[in-house]
Image (spheres, coloured by chain):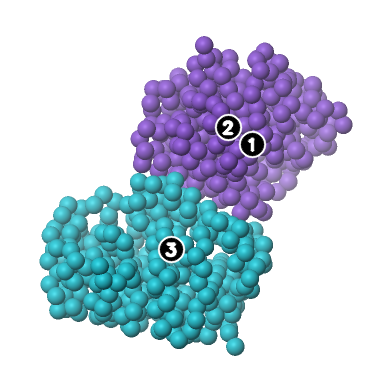
Chain colours: A purple, B cyan
């Protein structure tokens, strides 16, 4: 007997695919929606192998309201976990209209269709980027938001505001906003993981591509920050821990929680060089690096306080740096070309 | 010989219709687009009488991208003045999704169509509401933005951010964001003016409906603010002054100005009771009032500094409180039922 039916938008992506597993293992049934702009249904085939369950997955774009309405007319969803969205910071600065249209338009369509089918439970995939430059560390949920400087981050912030206003206007909505710190690692099976197209935007996929021999060296942007080794410090969280946070959020939603916001991070910061060394250790491969000038907009340290999620969701990250690197390396070395197979 | 062709979205509305006149009188040709949700084409018929020009006006919704594309394929616009949008603060709190969908969706559609036709000049109708609760007075353009507490105000702020990001990504755009203080008054002909449907949301239409006998008394929300008479102080600007500010902005755009932001106000604040007394004087009618509790979210004083518009646009408000009230009263007494005629 299923505990409920969860729609995961962007469910074929990195965080989405790992979250599908956790919902299935917690006794929910799931439906995956993805427009495959930045993902592959191969991830879902592998999740089917890992879980032994058949997973209904549809290639639907949230901007196609008709197709979305059709999907809702065929299923009775308990909740929607909304991952879908464009997410490359640099690209968002080049193509702001595309980002605003896609991310905000998709979310408004989704909320309108949800409302019309009386599905009023949502878990939203937000980001610590909504905090902008930290005013204090560790960042807790009371930290001011809205200071982000790129369109990607602003879409996350704007969507948060839309969700808060909706929950205020219509108190029968239950919405949990999860602010992710930096998701890394992969499922311990080595079958699914992060699969960036082209040059990775994020640090750890880049490092693992250096270790596997696909890239020559790591560019370290700035080694003169006010951090122990001078390189930027971030709060990395294992994607499986992060995925479990969504199940905990769903449990909270079932208590009719209204609108809530939680940081999901470990509360611990590691520097770029610490991450490179940790992956060297896990992989047994060298990760050469070159120090480059700081990038505009980067800050020295960002890490969060996730005590509220511990108190109110009973959730806490359990996997440390070694797990993150060991699992990432397993995925990377078993799938040097990601889901695209040998090439 | 026309100085250029200006598309005015929401051009049949209060500020829009007055701005049409000023553009025509400055030698531009105009096209009015309005979905008539909160306006009537009667205003444009009257503008035709006032100006002696025939004004192309289309009933098109900006959410209808096909119709919008069709319009752009028939005209070669120089600039777009973007007034269109839902604007009732209270309603926006009740129906946030409607406001976000309509105001942001319409703007993104408009920008995409403009871009596809290589029309990259826009004047945007923003509001001093983007400043939120004033941190200092008078508010200049350097005052922090984004502190607004209602979805209407947030749509203005979000659109400003979208415009700034667009201009940053594509430097061939010229965008002037005009932050209005409180537009009042009417054209001196008495032929056009503010025509709210139902109970007016704004102070002056309410006061003038009391003076004309359509409403019993004015509700004054709070008389214990830290202001000279205890009632709320705002920066009222004559709508014809405001309209002229758009023509000044267009002149600025013609210098390839990039993205600029200007306050349009008088820099002077008047209290609720001062406004009521001024309309009593202009109309010769009594405006009885009743003091009620403060409204949540209201602040004592809001007024702006419009020096930057003076310096960079050569624009300054020239009409004072007596003009505002005299012109409002002429419109109200000649058109007690607005554009709907006798009823």
**Front position in the image: A190 or A299:** A190
Q: In the image, is A101 to the left or to the right of B153?
A: right
Quadrant position of the C terminus of chain A in the picture: top right
| Alpha carbon separation for disc pair 1 and 2 | 9 Å
Q: Which residue is mark 1?
A: A60
Label 1 crowding class (10 Å Cα cut-off): few <14, some 14-19, many 20+? some
Chain on which label 1 sits: A
Q: Is residue A303 visible?
A: no
Chain on which label 3 sits: B
Mark 3–mark 1 CB contact (< 8 Å): no
Which residue is painted at 54% across and 82% down in the image? B28
**Front position in the image: A140 or B75:** B75
Chain on which label 2 sits: A
Label 2 crowding class (10 Å Cα cut-off): few <14, some 14-19, many 20+? some
| Alpha carbon separation for disc pair 3 and 1 | 34 Å
**Residue A16 quadrant:** top right
Q: Position of residue A276 (x, y in %)?
A: 72, 30
Which residue is painted at 28% across and 59% down in the image? B198
Numbered disc 3: secondary structure: loop
Q: Which residue is mark 3?
A: B36
Q: Do circles 1 and 2 both sit on a common chain? A: yes
Mark 1–mark 2 CB contact (< 8 Å): yes
Q: Which residue is mark 2?
A: A71
Which residue is painted at 37% across and 32% down in the image? A172
Q: In the image, is A280 to the left or to the right of A101?
A: right
Label 3 crowding class (10 Å Cα cut-off): few <14, some 14-19, many 20+? some
Q: Position of residue B40 (x, y in %)?
A: 40, 68
Q: Position of residue A178 (x, y in %)?
A: 50, 32
Which tag is nearer the camera, tag 1 or tag 2? 2
């Amino acid at each position: 007997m299923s505990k409920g039916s969860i729609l995961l938008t962007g469910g074929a992506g990195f965080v989405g695919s790992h979250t599908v597993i956790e919902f299935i293992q917690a006794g929910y049934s799931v439906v995956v929606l993805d427009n495959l702009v930045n993902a592959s249904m191969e991830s879902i085939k592998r999740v089917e192998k890992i879980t032994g369950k058949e997973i209904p997955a549809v290639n639907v774009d949230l901007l196609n309201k008709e197709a979305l309405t059709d999907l809702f007319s065929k299923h009775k969803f308990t909740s929607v976990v909304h991952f879908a969205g464009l997410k490359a910071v640099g690209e968002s600065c080049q193509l702001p209209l595309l980002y605003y249209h896609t991310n905000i338009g998709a979310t408004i369509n989704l909320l309108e269709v949800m409302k019309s089918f009386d599905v009023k439970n949502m878990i939203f995939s937000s980001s610590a980027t909504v905090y902008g430059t930290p005013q204090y560390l560790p960042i807790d949920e009371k930290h001011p938001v809205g200071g982000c400087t790129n369109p990607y981050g602003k879409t996350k912030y704007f969507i948060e505001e839309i969700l808060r206003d909706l929950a205020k206007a219509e108190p029968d909505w239950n919405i949990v906003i999860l602010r992710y710190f930096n998701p890394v690692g992969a499922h311990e099976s080595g079958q699914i993981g992060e699969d960036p197209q082209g040059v990775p935007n994020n640090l750890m996929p880049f490092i693992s591509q250096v270790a596997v021999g696909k890239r020559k060296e790591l560019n370290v942007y700035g080694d003169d920050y006010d951090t122990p080794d001078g390189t930027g410090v971030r709060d990395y969280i294992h994607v499986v821990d992060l995925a479990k946070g969504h199940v905990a959020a769903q449990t909270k939603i079932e208590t009719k929680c209204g609108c809530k916001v939680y940081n999901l991070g470990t509360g611990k910061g590691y520097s770029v060089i610490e991450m490179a060394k940790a992956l060297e250790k896990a992989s047994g491969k060298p990760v050469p690096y070159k120090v480059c000038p700081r990038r505009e907009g980067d800050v020295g340290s960002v890490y969060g306080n996730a005590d509220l999620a511990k108190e109110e969701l009973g959730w806490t990250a359990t996997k440390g740096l070694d797990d993150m690197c060991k699992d990432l390396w397993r995925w990377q070395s078993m799938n040097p070309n990601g889901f695209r197979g040998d090439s």
